[in-house]
Structure formats: C-alpha cells, structure tokens
Amino acid sequence: MSATQRRWLLLALVAIALVTFFALDLGRFFSLEALRAHREGLLTQISAHPLLSAGIFFAVYVVVTALSLPAAALLTIAGGALFGFGLGTLLVSFASTLGATLAMLLARYLLRESVQAKFGARLKAIDAGLEREGAFYLFALRLVPVFPFFLVNLTLGLTRLPARTFFWVSQLGMLPATAVYVYAGTEIGQLTSLKGLISPGLLGAFILLGLLPLITKKILDALRARRVYQGHSRPKRYDYNLIAIGAGSAGLVTTYIGAAVKAKVALIERHKMGGDCLNTGCVPSKALIRTARLLAEARRSQDYGIKALHAEFDFATAMERVQQVIAKVEPHDSVERYSGLGVDCIQGEARVIDPWTVEVDGRRLTTRNIVIATGARPTVPKLPGIDTVDYLTSDTVWNIRVQPKRLLVLGGGPIGCELGQCFSRLGSAVTIVQRNPRLLPKEDPDASAAVRAAFEAEGITLALGAEALRVEKDGEGGRLIVSENGVERAIEFDRLLLALGRTANVAGFGLEELGVIVSPRGTVEADPLMRTSMPNILVCGDVTGPYQFTHVAAHQAWYAAVNALFGPFWTFKVDYRVIPWATFTDPEVAHVGLSETTATEQGVAYEVTHYGLDDLDRAIADSHDHGYVKVLTVPGKDRILGATIVGAHAGDLLAEYVLAMRHGLGLRKILGTIHSYPTMMEANKYAAGNWARAHAPQAALRWVERFHAWRRG
C-alpha cells in the first residue's frame, strides 16, 4: 500500500469515527447532566476496579482529544468528580497531552502537504513565532488560550515543531487550566442540591479560571522580560518617560502625543527636523510636480480654448522654489514649535546603550521607554560600476541646479514614476528602466496600463522587464547595460536617478548590540503593540514598515506613544485594516483596501463596480475626462473591500472610501449622501449608483411596473 493510500485510509477511519460520534449522538454521554446522573454508579465501578477504571478513562480521554471531539472540557471536570483532585489531575494532564500530540501528528500526516501548498502564506505568523521563540511560543499559546486547544493542536501539526517539544511544552502549558477544571469537578462531585452550585469553592474555581489568562499573561510577560533584560540593570529613576530617536513623521507624532498627555519626553535628531518627508520626500516632490504639471497644461492650452500659451522656464529657479516650499512648511516641524509644546529637542547622534539609556554625543539620558523612529534611506543596488558615476537618489536630486538632458531612472515604482514624469515635463529626455514587466507593480494591471499609456504619450521611454547588469562611465555621464529577453543593450544617460525603494535605518545606533530582532525584510521587527523584542523599546515608521508612508508612520506613532506611556495598564493593537496610498503621477493612482490582484491572491470573493471619469461632468469641463473609479465589494452586498481610483485628484477622491471602510459604511450610504455639483467627488456617488443598478430587485420592479400600469387605468 502506497503512502497516499495509507493516508486516505487513515483519513477515512477518522471521518467514520467523527460521523459515528455525531450520528449516534454520543455527545449526550459527555454532558454535565449525564455526569450527575451516573456519578454514583461510576464511583461504584471505580471503587471495585480502580486500575481498570482509570485506564478506561485515560484511553477515552486520549481518543476524544486525538479526534478533537467537543468533550474534553467535560471529561476534565469528570476527572475531578470521579477520581479526586490529585489522581484526576494526573490522569487528565497526561491523557490530554498524549491526545493533543496524537491530534498534532494526525494533522501533520494527513493534511500538512496539501494545507502548506494552499495556505502556506497564512501560516507565516505561526512559523515566524516558532522560529523566533520556539517552545516559548507554544507555551504562550497553552497558557493564554487565545485559540481553542484543539485548534492549536491541528495548526501546529502543519509546522515543523518536533513532537517531543510539542509534548513536554503542552504538558506544562496546559497544567494550570487542567488543575482548575479538575478542581471544579471535585466541587461539582460534592453537590447535593442546587444550592451547592454557589458554593465558595466552586465559585473560586471558576473565578480562577476566568482570571487564568490574565494571570498567565503577566507571568509570561515577566518571564520574557527576565530573559530579554538579562545582563542589564534597570535605573531606579528615569530622566524621561519617553525618548524618540528620529524627528521624521513618526518621531514628531510620538513626542507630540507624549507632551500632550504631560509626559516628559525628548526627541533626538542628528540631521534636520521633519525627516525625509519634509526635506527630501513628500514636500519637495509635490512642489516640483506642481511646477511640471503647470508646464504640461501650458503645452496643451488648446484643450482649454487657448491657441498658444508660452511659458518661460528656468530649471534652477524651479528647484529654488522647491526649497522655498520646504522653508514655508518647516515651522510646522521646527525645534521652536516642539519645544513650545513641551518636547526636549536634542540635536546630535543618538546611541542606545542599554534598554533604558540613550547616549547623545557623550551625554547619557535615562528613560522608561525608547521609540525608534530612524526612518529609511534610498536603496543603492550592488550594481557593478555604480560608484563610477555621480548617481542621484530621492535624497540628493534636490541639490542639482543643472537640468540633465538625458535622465535615466532605475526603478518604476511610485518614486521613479513621479520623478520620471516630472523631469520629462520639465524637458529632460527620460528613460525608465524597470525589472518588472509593468510600472507600479503593486497596483492592478489596469492602473499600471493607464500610467504606462500616459507616459508613452508624453514621450517617456520605457524599458520594462529589463534587468540592470552594470554601469559604465562615459565622460560626464555613462551608460546602463541591461538585459531584455536575454539580449544585452546599452542605455546612455547624463544623470542616473536610483528609485529602487528605501532601506530601513536599523544599524549604527546600538540596536544590534542589544540584540533587538531585525526581520528578514531588513526592518526592526515589531509586535501588534509596536514593541520590539525588548518590550520597552518600541518602533514606528519606515524603520519597521510594513508600509513606508508618512501617514502610516503617524498612525503607528500614536500606538507606539500610547502603549509606551500607558502600558501595561492600557494597550492598543495597531490597526492596518484601512491603509490608503496615492501615487501622484498624471493620472494619479490612489488605492485603499484590497485590489483585484490581492483579493485573488488571498482567495477573497469579490464583485467589481466601475465608473469611468469620461462620463463625469466636472472631469469633462476640466478636460480631465480620463480614468476610472473601481470598487470591490462583498458579492451581493455593498460592503466595500477596496477601491482604486485612476485620474485627476484621485488621492483626494479616495478619502470618501477610506472613511466608509474605516466606519463600516457601504455603497448605499455613499449613494444616499448629497455631493456638490459639479465636483470630482460625484464620481464616488455615480460608482455607487452603478452598483445599485446592478443589484436592483428586478422581481420587485416588475410588480411596481404593474402597479403603475394599474394606476394609469
């Protein structure tokens, strides 16, 4: 018999056992009423044949647990009622562990290969926990029963956890709950009337059972802290409640909240307040995009009834305007403002000495909590010859004052697309090289196609599906050698702009010496409370991800600040359910929730509703009548799963869907909301209208039609 046949045979036997249990209603023998009714007779049998009775009870418990039948809790109580606390606890403890191990092995033998193949991605959290903490992770699942024990048995059968580790950890982890249930059974066994139900001992047992998760969580936290902080001495007093390292969006919001709740907080920054967003990211890029868009509109003045519109443009002046915009926004993130709010702003190089001490240029500060908000930097690839040319990044491009005639952008993500189109509109000959076969690969293919069509219409050269091989210096510029379908070719440039994403700043300030865990993605690993592997060191922003957006950094910062300052008394898990983002190309691409691509990958059923902006009055009036609104909903319902908007002002239009998803509002609510006419926002209403028409109750409408015909006579 082959392994597959043996597997199917065993699966059939398990299925027969389960069907028999439920078909014959054997569960009626595993109820509290049955236990009370037959207790005296069972006690007589146990007294006459103690070893045999204990063996039968043990075997039944093992079988019930191995098959994950809904009777284990009652059998645990029965153990106390029939065998007393000591022997009952001994029998149940070993029987439950043996049964759980058999259930785990059954799941591993029968399901592991097929489930891993289909749902491997969904088991990553369990696998990551086991890899990080091993037996301690399982111990936590046993002591704090977030999931039912049978579900833990089956799930861990799909992992590579050794059976012997599973056995002994389960034996220890389930012991507290086992003891409480068995004790409850001893009290139930002594009942002589209904008044006994409120006996102090029984009430105490169930109160203890209710408090068990909280108690064991505190014990686990203490054990983790003892292990994590071993070798470090905690100060008796602290200079600060919280110190944030990094004055970008994450650090600014963290300390703002800390000061607002009257904590003593400090903010350390080695460079400029405001971080990447203010100085090299969002603010400067949008300032330059506005200049480039104005030039593009001037070139298409005939679309607005103007025969010709001549614009005199100076690149250096436009770049100086970018600096002026930064200077105008700068006071929002300045030392003066935050000092006025009560934040101690410290300029200097920070280094974490121990979990409670930060050193700044030789000065040591103690703090109860540290928040790491060190952000990220442009990724520079290990490309042969890259250091032979004076390449640009999203950090350094703002320093140039001579416009490149030929700009090569390496990377077709949001940064590459925004800056590539921007420089093209300013007059540079732009080539975008992208390894992926399409631009903006995190968006749906139709959104990527819309951006590609716009770029090609504007004269941007695209090299998609091209692998960068090496850089060769050539005079003041150079050439990038790429491979397309196995064929090498050279793309010449005057300047090279690297736009390959951002790398988290995780090293150089003490985290590695402390042993703070860095994820495989190269970011500081955080739990749902934004805590690192050292619970009093929290993290937020680009340095941890998973979304590298300014608004997400601010979102995470709230959780980091509150959990640092008020934990363990009040803590909140970060909520990533509704995360919007926008790419400010022309057309803009904005997105929230699930896309068609991610919904398909995750196996989520959905319906799609489209509305084309070529039908919208305001878009037509503005000559922006291209693009669409696409909404994903639950099949047959108006609950929004996600939305993608491509077109003018898409980032602004998306806000209505973000609000709706965050507060559980469906498309019917959007349809029933008055939208000013004529505005671009009406696109959302018309998209909801398209959904409503597709789901109109046709049978009811036929009756209404007959009603109106009857009224006409």
Image (tube, rainbow, N blue to C red):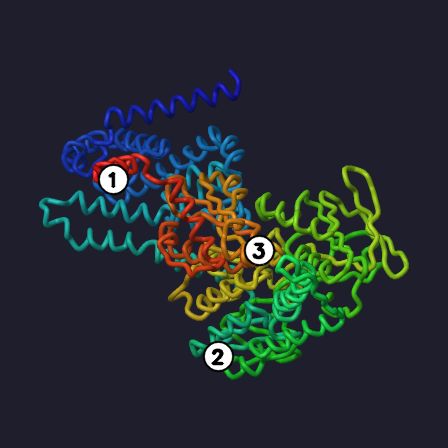
Determine the CA span between mark 1 and mark 3.
Answer: 41 Å
Determine which of the numbered discs, if any, sits on residue 624 in the image.
3
SS under mark 3: loop
Residues at marks 3 and 2, CA–CA distance in whole angstroms:
51 Å
Q: From the viewer's perspective, is residue 530 above or below residue 192?
A: below
Q: Disc 2 marks which residue?
A: 264
Question: Residue 603: x and y, percent?
Answer: 48, 38
Mark number for residue 240?
A: none
**Disc with the residue nearer the chain's start (1 vs 3):** 3
Towards the viewer: 68 or 298: 298
Residue 480 in percent (x, y) is at: 82, 51
At a point 68% along the width and 56% down the height, the residue shown is 416
Q: Position of residue 140 (x, y in %)?
A: 43, 51
- Foreground: 61 or 285? 285
Left or right of 112 on screen, residue 710: left
Q: Judge from the rendering whether residue 709 lies leftward or rightward of residue 191; answer left or right.
A: right
Which callout, 1 or 2, points to the residue nearer the camera? 1
Q: Quadrant of residue 540?
A: bottom right
Amino acid type, mark 3? His
Which residue is the extreme one toward the top? Answer: 1
For label 1, count other residues whose C-alpha is less than 10 Å away and answer few (under 14), some (14-19) or many (20+).
Answer: few
Contact (CB < 8 A) between labels 3 and 2?
no
Which of the two discs, 3 and 2, labels the residue nearer the N terminus? 2
**Which sits in the foreground, 353 or 350?**
350
Query: Which amino acid type corresponds to the residue marked 2 in the rendered image?
Result: Lys
Viewed as shown, does residue 100 lie left or right of 464?
left
Q: Nearer the viewer, mark 3 or mark 2?
A: 3
Q: Which amino acid does the dot numbered 1 rest on?
A: His
Q: Are marks 1 and 2 in contact (CB under 8 Å)?
A: no
Residue at mark 1: 708
Q: Residue reaching furthest right?
A: 475
